[in-house]
Image: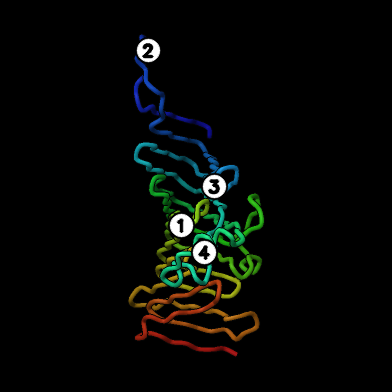
Amino acid sequence: TQELRVSLAEPIDFVDPSMNGKLDVARIECHGGVVMDNWSFQGAAQTSWDRMQSDDLSVDRVSGEIVGRGPGRVTTVRLETPRLSGSPFNRGGDADWPAAAQAAPKRLTYLSVEFQDRLEGNLHGRTLTFHDQVHGVYGPVDSWDATLEMDDPDSLGPNGALLSSDELTVTQMTTPLEGTQSMELVAQGNVRIEGKMFNAWGHRMSYDQAKDLLILKGTGRADAELFYQKQIGAPPQHAQMGEIRFRPSTNQIQVDDARSVEFSQFS
């Protein structure tokens, strides 16, 4: 950063240094362009890498509040929580899930978000909210330094997607498996999602990584819409309803709002 201001938790006594306690930082303010990196480890094994870029940034270590002024970008790469068919997330309980998931191969998940106005969140709550012209890319990667592009959904593979919205909140969730995290994404306002196997529009979207569940909602006056293929080469399907529940990894749709269901198939 070009300028760094640090506020200490306690004043320093220069007259009698013996009166000073442990030096601790209460607040950090960065101005003139900021790049901040963070690495997390479980023992000697790396579990995540995060990079935050913005014009200005303030972090309150006491309250956990974090505020940044855009335009900016936040990128995170972390070990993905394995999704198993018998996991408690998907079937309502399995005592052997942590042991089975520990033996399952771990993948890296990449998420990068660009925003124009500001970001705000809380370090203690492990949440960030991005405002104005939000664009993101999400998908698996093979290494910690790999990247995904925001302009080509076909290059992301079957499990990647592009996202745009007016606002996006990203929350890091705890899981039963030590050394892994799960993400929850909630987007609002002019939500559009593009994947290799599906495209969707709506007013509000939530995605639970551990459950592999995407929920798309309309406005009440306008339905959410989803175009998808059950598999490569299959005819496209169209769903239009007040609420759409979709599992991207299996391209399966769950219908809850029967009043507004409309399915059609295109040859």
Asked whether disc 2 touches disc 1, contact meaning CB atoms under 8 Å apart, the reply is: no
Q: Earlier in the sequence, mark 4 or mark 1?
A: 4
Residue 193 or residue 39, whichever sits in front:
39
Q: Residues within 10 Å of mark 1 (few under 14, many from 20)?
A: some
Residue to which mark 4 is pinned:
163
Q: Quadrant of residue 35?
A: top right
Residue type beneath disc 4: Leu
Q: What's the CA distance linking mark 3 and mark 4?
A: 19 Å
Q: Which is more foreground, mark 1 or mark 3? A: 1
Q: Earlier in the sequence, mark 3 or mark 4?
A: 3
Q: Residues within 10 Å of mark 4 (few under 14, many from 20)?
A: many
Asked which secondary structure carries label 3, the reply is strand
Q: Earlier in the sequence, mark 2 or mark 3?
A: 2
Q: What's the CA distance linking mark 2 and mark 3?
A: 39 Å
Q: Position of residue 62 (x, y in %)?
A: 35, 37
Q: What's the CA distance linking mark 4 and mark 1?
A: 25 Å
Q: Which is more foreground, mark 3 or mark 4? A: 3
Q: Is residue 93 found left or right of 163 in the rendered image?
A: left
Q: Position of residue 67 (x, y in %)?
A: 41, 44
- 168 versus 220 height, above or below: above
Residue pictured at 42% horizontal, 53% vertical: 129
Q: What's the CA distance linking mark 1 and mark 3?
A: 19 Å
Asked which secondary structure carries label 2, the reply is helix
Residue to which mark 3 is pinned:
50
Residue type beneath disc 1: Thr
Q: Earlier in the sequence, mark 1 or mark 3?
A: 3
Residue type beneath disc 2: Ser
Q: Earlier in the sequence, mark 2 or mark 1?
A: 2
Q: Earlier in the sequence, mark 4 or mark 2?
A: 2
Residue to which mark 1 is pinned:
175
